[in-house]
Amino acid sequence: MASIPPPPPPERPTEQIYVPPAEPLVRERVLTPSPAEPLVRERVLAAPPLEAGLLAARLSSLQTWLAIVALIAVAAIAVAIYALTRDNKATTSAGASDARVTQLDARVNSLSSQVKSLRPGAGAGAASSSTTAALGTRVGALEHSVSTLTSRPAAADPTQAISQLSTRVDTLASQVAALKQAPPQTPPTTP
């Protein structure tokens, strides 16, 4: 019986195929010089000729990568132009008007002059310290009234508060009228 040859080993698609490097072509030239010159030998190494299919595949791959890089560059330029135009639109509408700037400048100047007049060295020493003390008292009273007003519960209905105030005013008016009509009382005398 004839023996059957064993099957070939399976190919591994992820493993690179080893291709031995091509031997460079060597050409030798021998120059025959004139009798007075020495004999010269040259060795010229030449690269192996490229196959047409391999060269075409390499050029095709290079063209593909060049097209991908060009596409990415065009997309980056488009995004940059969009960002620049969008930024310009945002900054042009956010500016203040000239009238508003002039108004703010005048306000800053008036506040600056007020601060200069309130400084202790600006006027007489006693007058400025008494002014400062008076202002401190007024600020303290204002802080107290603000804290009192914020601690009060807010009225739910303003019309109710107005009606309560009207009732209180009417009551006071009637009490004043009653006091005017009553005979005057003499204060008791002390012995």
Image (cartoon, rainbow, N blue to C red):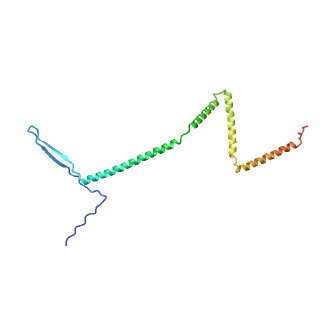
Nearest the viewer among 83 and 146 is: 83
In the rendered view, does 139 fall on the left or right side of 24? right
Residue occupying the far left of the picture: 35
Please identify the quadrant where the C terminus is shown: top right
In this rendering, position of residue 65 left or right of residue 127 = left
Outermost residue, bottom direction? 1
User: Which residue is at the front of the view, 9 or 152?
Assistant: 152
**Which residue is depicted at the point 83% across and 45% down?**
175
Where is 129 relative to 80, above or below? above
- Figure check: 112 above or below 93: above
Q: Residue at x 44, y 45 (%)?
A: 81
Residue at x 39% of width, y 47% of height: 74
| Closer to the camera in the image, 41 or 167 | 167
Please state, as top left, top right, bottom left or bottom right, where the N terminus lies in the image. bottom left
Count of marks placed on residues: 0
Question: Residue 37's x, y, as percent?
Answer: 10, 38
Instruction: Name the residue furthest top.
Output: 124
Q: Residue at x 69, y 46 (%)?
A: 151
Residue found at the very far right of the displayed protein: 191
Residue 184: image quadrant is top right
Q: Position of residue 2 (x, y in %)?
A: 19, 71
| On screen, residue 34 above or below 15 | above
Q: Position of residue 141 (x, y in %)?
A: 70, 39
Percent from the top left, x then y, of residue 95?
A: 54, 40
Depth check: give the residue in front, 133 or 89: 89
The answer to whether residue 74 is left or right of residue 142 is: left
Which quadrant of the structure image shows residue 189?
Answer: top right
